[in-house]
Image (cartoon, rainbow, N blue to C red):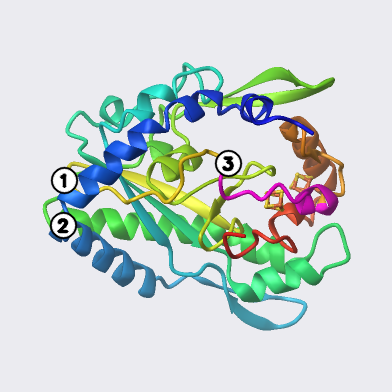
């Protein structure tokens, strides 16, 4: 059985475990700032923008049925000067590519993370599918980027209307992801050193922790998509209900058994090299090859187990 120290190191979050104390700072800060008006205004803006999205449905051509793509997001807030952000530069977490909020926008005061669950209609079809890929996931999950982009554009406009400056690092031309070869156990793997990571931002913003499959497990599960933005707005940080970067994962191994590529193990977590190679081999001219079997049919699909 892997011990916790090995588990965190393999997962590339060893330094996070050492840096969880700052969450206590967030919690005490939260207690001092109850009822922040800016938080309420941001939630109201997110509700409004999400409910007015015009592209959050998809036609499944085989079934000739229209289903929703994403559910309304969970929203978490971190202070821009959260000490966790400095720890992300550690090579065992994200690495030297990482740039904290103030490096993107000097006026940064808060960072907001969004987790949009994939709709139950799409998840149910993906869960039941017996084929390597299926139209619900290909067309439904496959449209999430367009939906999230429309949401973020709406949020930028809504915040501007309220006089708030925003910045979205993943949309900036300088945003970078570098793939670095690493070994996990006796297997070759890949480490993604990136200048901004929605998963790590969401962890710092109290939305959830990582799982063996390396997705973020929130109170609405892991089967969803993440986005984030920086604001020059003072906001109350979200109170995280965890201390450990893997606290929401019950280490049950269900995602290991779901993976058709054998790319996940309890000892070495999801092997990103094997996962991406499998997905690339699924792709054809008419099939984007979205796998995602490890996001459904597991205890952490839609709840925190
Ligand atoms: S399926 Fe089980 S082991 Fe895999 S991430 Fe979810 S809780 Fe963890
Ligand atoms: S996306 Fe597919 S291949 Fe990759 S880890 Fe998940 S189940 Fe395995």
Task: Residue 193: give x, y in percent of width and height.
Answer: 55, 24
Mark 2 or mark 3, which is nearer the start of the sequence?
A: 2
Give the total of numbered labels. 3
Which residue in the structure is indicated by mark 1? 234
**How many angstroms separate mark 3 from mark 2 (CA)?**
29 Å
Q: Nearer the viewer, residue 49 or 12?
A: 12
Task: Residue 44: give x, y in percent of width and height.
Answer: 25, 68
Task: Residue 18: give x, y in percent of width and height.
Answer: 47, 25
Q: Nearer the viewer, mark 3 or mark 1?
A: 3
Secondary element under disc 2, as helix, strand or loop, is: loop
Residue at left 21%, top 43%? 29
Q: Residues within 10 Å of mark 2 (few under 14, many from 20)?
A: few
Q: Is residue 236 visible?
A: no
> Could you tell whether 11 is left or right of 253 in the image?
left
Which residue in the structure is indicated by mark 2? 36
Mark 2 or mark 1, which is nearer the start of the sequence?
A: 2
Mark 1 or mark 3, which is nearer the start of the sequence?
A: 1
The magenta region covers 246-258
Secondary element under disc 1, as helix, strand or loop, is: loop
Residue 207 belongs to magenta span: no
In this rendering, the answer to whether 162 lies above or below 32 is below
Which residue in the structure is indicated by mark 3? 246
> Could you tell whether 103 is left or right of 53 in the image?
left
Q: Are marks 1 and 2 in contact (CB under 8 Å)?
A: yes
């Amino acid at each position: 059985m892997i011990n916790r120290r090995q588990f965190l190191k393999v997962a590339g979050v060893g330094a996070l475990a050492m840096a969880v104390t700052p969450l206590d700072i967030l919690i005490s800060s939260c207690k001092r700032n109850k009822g922040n008006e800016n938080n309420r205004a941001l939630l109201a803006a997110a509700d409004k923008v999400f409910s007015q999205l015009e592209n959050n449905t998809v036609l499944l051509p085989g079934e000739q049925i229209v289903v929703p793509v994403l559910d309304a997001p969970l929203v978490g807030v971190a202070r821009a000067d959260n000490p966790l952000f400095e720890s992300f530069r550690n090579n065992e977490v994200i690495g030297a590519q990482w740039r904290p909020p103030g490096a993107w926008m000097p006026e940064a005061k808060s960072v907001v993370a969004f987790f949009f669950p994939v709709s139950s209609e799409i998840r149910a079809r993906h869960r039941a599918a017996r084929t390597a890929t299926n139209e619900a996931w290909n067309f439904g999950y496959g449209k999430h980027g367009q939906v999230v982009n429309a949401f973020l554009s709406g949020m930028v406009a809504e915040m501007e209307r309220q006089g708030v400056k925003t910045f979205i690092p993943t949309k900036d031309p300088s945003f970078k992801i570098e793939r670095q070869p690493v070994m996990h156990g006796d297997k070759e793997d890949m480490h993604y050193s990136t200048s901004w990571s929605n998963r790590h931002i969401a962890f710092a913003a109290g939305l959830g922790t990582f799982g063996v499959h390396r997705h973020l497990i929130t109170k609405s599960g892991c089967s969803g998509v993440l986005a984030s933005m920086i604001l020059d707005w003072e906001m109350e940080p979200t109170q995280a209900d965890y201390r450990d970067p893997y606290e929401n994962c019950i280490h049950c191994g269900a995602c290991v058994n779901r993976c058709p590529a054998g790319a996940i193990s309890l000892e070495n977590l999801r092997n990103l090299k094997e996962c991406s190679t499998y997905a690339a081999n699924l792709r054809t001219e008419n099939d984007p090859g979205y796998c995602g079997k490890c996001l459904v049919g597991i205890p952490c699909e839609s709840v925190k187990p």
